[in-house]
Amino acid sequence: MVVHTDMNMLSVLDYAVNVLKVKHVIVCGHYGCGGVQTAMSNKQVGLIDNWIRHIKDVYRFHNEELDAITNEKDRFDRFVELNVYEQVYDLAKTSIIQNAWSSDQAVHVHGWVYNIADGFIRDLDITLKNNDSLEEVYQLGIN
């Protein structure tokens, strides 16, 4: 999960982008994700409910598509994919990625899903490499 107040995630991202100068950042979810499965329900599981709420927000953004999928496993798999999709965009919205792009640093943010059952990684064909991929409201005025 890419939560903009998560200092652990931001610290790792900052180090990777600004110190190591990585060219590719991969957001990789996995089919069968317990967090996504819990987000599909109304179960209360404890403190983690606060983290799961971010996944439930992904449902809110894509509820029409997800509700139209009648097969529960297919809906679950698609929810996993959509969660990765949203996390890729959330990563691109960070000031760390925005600053890198502003300084013409080649950083690409990709979205993948790992299938635990067969060991294959599915490239979701989501790659963001500059601000043009984001709505204007998210394009920070960094100079």
Image: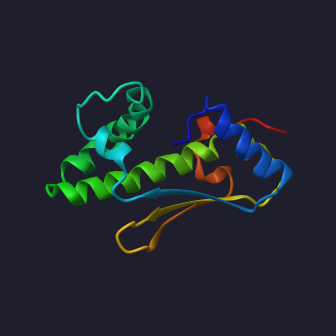
Residue 30 quadrant: bottom left
Residue 68 drawn above or below residue 55: below
Q: Position of residue 58 (x, y in %)?
A: 39, 41
- Residue projecting furthest to the front: 46
Judge left or right: residue 11 versus residue 46: right
- Closest to the observer: 135 or 41? 41
Judge left or right: residue 13 versus residue 57: right
Judge left or right: residue 142 versus residue 108: right
* Residue 98 in view (yes/no): no
The residue drawn where x is 37% and y is 53% is 80
Q: Position of residue 128 (x, y in %)?
A: 61, 57
Q: Which of the colour schemes (rainbow, by chain, secondary structure, one colour) is used? A: rainbow
The total of numbered circles placed on residues is 0
Residue 12 quadrant: top right
Q: Position of residue 21 (x, y in %)?
A: 82, 57
Judge left or right: residue 6 versus residue 95: left
The residue drawn where x is 56% and y is 41% is 2
- Residue projecting furthest to the left: 70
Q: Position of residue 47 (x, y in %)?
A: 41, 25
The residue drawn where x is 73% and y is 39% is 11
The residue drawn where x is 67% and y is 49% is 131
- Closest to the observer: 93 or 28? 28
Question: Considering the image in quadrants, where does the C terminus appear?
Answer: top right
* Residue 138 in view (yes/no): yes
- Closest to the observer: 32 or 84? 32
